[in-house]
Image: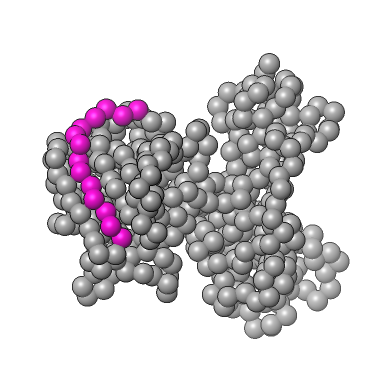
Amino acid sequence: MIAGFVFVALAQAQADLPLRVGSRWTYAQDGKEVMAIEIVGREQTATDDFFVARIRGQYFFLYSQEDLWLSNGGDGVRIHGEGHPDQMTRENPPLTLLPAQMEKGASWQAQPGRKVAATVQGLEAVRVPAGDFKAWKIEYVWTGGSGTEYSYRAWFAAGTGFVKIELWQQLSKGEKKPTESILELVRYEPERRIRPLPPSDLTQEDRAKAEQLIGRLKEDQVADRTKVVSSLVDLGRGVLPLIRDRIAGANDPEVAGRLKEVLEAFPKVEISVRKLGANGSVGKPCPISFALRNLTDSRIQVLPSLGGLNRYPRYTIEIRDEKGDLQNPSKGPRVICGFENPIDPWDFVTLEPGEECDPFGPGTMGHALSPWIPERPGTYTVVAAYDASGDVPDAWKGSIVAMEARAHKLLTAMPRGRFESKRLTIVIDP
C-alpha cells in the first residue's frame, strides 16, 4: 500500500507528518516487529491542540512505552509533553522534532530540559520493508538525563513520517561507543484497521422465526431455554435490534432478564488466525497472523498479551501435525520473571466496531509460538484462544496487592469470557 503512494508533498519541503486519530506506524529491527506508534487521541484546549501518540515496544528516540503530545503547525512538529494521562511531564518550551520547512543545512537546538541538536543533511532514496521513499536525512544528538549523548540518523518522508531511525553512537564519560540499532518502517496505516461488521438486516422469514422464539422466552415453562437462546443467536446480528426493542418494552423484569441473556450470548470479541500468502517453508517463520476483533456495535477495550504465569488475560496457541501431536516453541521454553507488573490503563487497546489489533504485536509479551518456525514439512492446524474470564480483580492482579482504580474500572467494563478461533490448516513445504 505504501509503495504506491506519490509524495507530492516532498516538493513543498514541509515537515508533513500526518497526525490523525487512528494513524499507526509499525517498525521492525532485524526483521522482527518491535515498535508501534499510534495516534490514540486529540487534546484541544483554548490555547493548545495536541495529538496523543502512544508508543508500544522499543524506544522512539529516547521515549519508550509512553504517550507523547505532538503538534504540527507553523513551528514544525513539536513535542509538548511525555508520560501518560494524568502523569504528563511537559516540555517547556516544546521540543522541536522537525522544522516547519525541510531544507539541506537546516538546524536547531532545544534546551533547557532535554537537550537536542539536529541538522538536516539532505534528501536521499531509502528502501525499507514499507517501500521505497525519498526522505530527508536528519542527524540528531539527544542528551539523556545522565548526560549521555545519543547520536541518531533518521530519515523522514513527508506524508508518511519517519521511515528509518538509526542509533549509531553513544558518548558517555568522554568515551564514544558505536551501536547498531536500526528501526525500519514496516507499515504505515493512515486509518484504523476496521472490517465492516456483517449487515444486521433480517429477512421476513428470519424475523418470523425470531418473533416465535422470543414468544417462547416469554413463556413461564420453557423446556430448554438455552436452546432457544442459541437459536436466536444463530439467526445472526440482525436479531439484536429486535431484542433490544423487546427489552425496552418489556413490563415483566423476568422476561427482560431472559431477553438480556440473548444479548449476552452474542460473541463480543473474535480471535482469528489467518494465513499470509503462500505455504510456509521449513526453517522460516510460519506465514500466519493473529487478530483480536470487536464484534459489537460499540467501542470496547481489550488487553493484549501481557505475560505472566498466574493472571489473566491468558492467550493460548496450539499447533498440531497430521498425527495430532502438539508442536513445541521454536526456541524452547522462555524464562519468565515471577514478578508480574500491575495492569495499567494504557495497557488496554481501544477497538471501534469491526476494528482489530494484533494481540502479540509490539509492546506485548508475545507468545512462545508466535512466530513458530517449523522443523519439517507437512500439514498443520493452528488454533488460538483469548481467555478473559477471570474474576475481577483478583485473577488479574498478579504480584500486586491492589489494582489502580482506573484499571479496575476499565477491566470491569471489558468484554469477558473465553474466545477461541476457527481452526486454520496450513501446509509447510520442504
- Residue 297 x %, y %: 52, 61
Which residue: 50% across, 33% down?
30
Determine if the magenta segment contains residue 119: yes
Can you say whether 258 is above or below 340 in the image? below
On the question of residue 419 being in view, the answer is: no
Q: Quadrant of residue 94?
A: bottom left
* Number of numbered callouts drawn: 0
- Residue 128 x %, y %: 38, 31
Which residue: 28% across, 57% down?
115
Which residue: 63% across, 79% down?
250
Determine if the magenta segment contains residue 210: no
On the question of residue 33 being in view, the answer is: yes
Residue 238 falls left or right of residue 427: left
Q: Which residues are magenta?
A: 114-127
Which residue: 28% across, 46% down?
140
Residue lying at the far top of the rendered structure: 430
Can you say whether 44 is above or below 356 in the image? below
- Residue 151 x %, y %: 33, 44
Residue 370 falls left or right of residue 89: right
Residue lying at the far front of the rendered structure: 174
Q: Main secondary structure of the magenta part?
A: strand
Q: Nearer the viewer, residue 385 or 340?
A: 340
Q: Quadrant of residue 143?
A: bottom left
Q: Quadrant of residue 184?
A: top left
Q: Nearer the viewer, residue 160 or 381?
A: 160
- Quarter holding the C terminus is top right
Q: Nearer the viewer, residue 45 or 29?
A: 29
Can you say whether 152 is above or below 343 in the image? above
- Residue 104 x %, y %: 14, 37
- Quarter holding the N terminus is top left
- Colour scheme of the picture: one colour
